[in-house]
Image: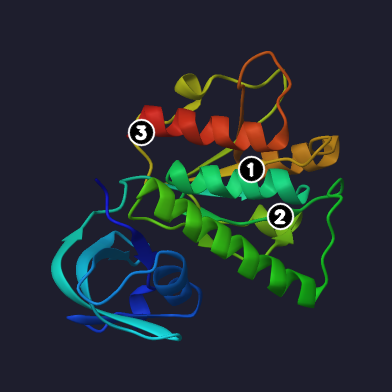
Amino acid sequence: MSLPRFHLPANDWREPHLMLTGNEAQHCSRVMRKQPGDTIEIFDGAGRVAVCEITHVSKAEVQAKITTETLTKPFQTAIHLLPALIKAEPFEWLLEKAVELGAASIQPIITERTVIHLDAAQTEKKLAKWRRHMIESAKQCHTPFLPELKVPVSFAASLKLAADFKLIPALSEHSRTLKHAMPSSKPNSIAVLIGPEGDFTAEEEAQAFAASFVPITLGPLVLRAETAAIATLAILGHELR
């Protein structure tokens, strides 16, 4: 039986004693009703997982002592997902599955056909909510990794992301299967550009091709934006890992 798991960012680790605060402390003490002497797992999202014994519980914090610790190395190829912002529920589902499928980072982008527009205050609130959603997904599936969630940027800015190999699922006559598009040597990093509801405009698609994004096919059927993102991550995981 797996132990209940809680997240503590790497910068907050003070071995051998760890302290949960905020949402994670409340989840541990109030929701899970853990007490001193109970055993839990704490992970940092970067591959480190510690089995810990709780030593102190209060309303604001949970203190625990590490008993054993493991470190999982990151995947050889880092997959960076660049999805266009889409409606709330599908986007949260996309984030959840991207965590499960091992994306290294998620960079939301704003395209010409993006229907979600956020001001600075709304963006800050959304990012906090999305990060909480991703943490819960990582806890549930017991992955040691948590993708980095970045602040949304413009489509033009997303094209400048540095990566060894760049992909864009596209219903284009130039699209190839991933197996035929992949370079002969395994890349260290891959960027995946995903369009919004209604897809990219023809001009945006042309700009992506000019920025070295290779068009690939996910089959003959038209997929929703969130489905295309997850299908691409799953295919890449199968081919690379």
Q: Are marks 2 and 3 in contact (CB under 8 Å)?
A: no
- Residue 109: mark in rendering: 2
Q: Which badge, 2 or 1, comes first in the chain's sequence?
A: 2
- In the picture provided, is 218 more to the left or to the right than 112? left
Quadrant in which the C terminus is drawn = top left
Q: Which structural element holds mark 3?
A: helix
The residue type indicated by label 3 comes to Leu
Q: What residue sits 86% from the left and 49% below the top?
A: 112
The residue type indicated by label 2 comes to Ile
Q: How far is mark 1 from mark 3, CA to CA?
A: 18 Å
Quadrant in which the N terminus is drawn = top left
Label 3 neighbourhood size at 10 Å, few (<14), some (14-19), many (20+)? few
Q: Which badge, 1 or 3, comes first in the chain's sequence?
A: 1
Q: What residue sits 71% from the left and 36% below the top?
A: 225
Residue at the limit of the structure toward the top, as seen here: 220
Q: Which badge, 2 or 3, comes first in the chain's sequence?
A: 2
Quadrant assignment, res 212: top right
Residue 26 at what x, y percent from top left? 47, 75
Q: What residue sits 61% from the left and 44% below the top?
A: 94
Q: How far is mark 2 from mark 3, CA to CA?
A: 25 Å
- Residue 240: mark in rendering: 3
Could you say which is closer to the camera, residue 30 or residue 82?
30
- Residue 193: mark in rendering: 1
Q: Which structural element holds mark 1?
A: strand
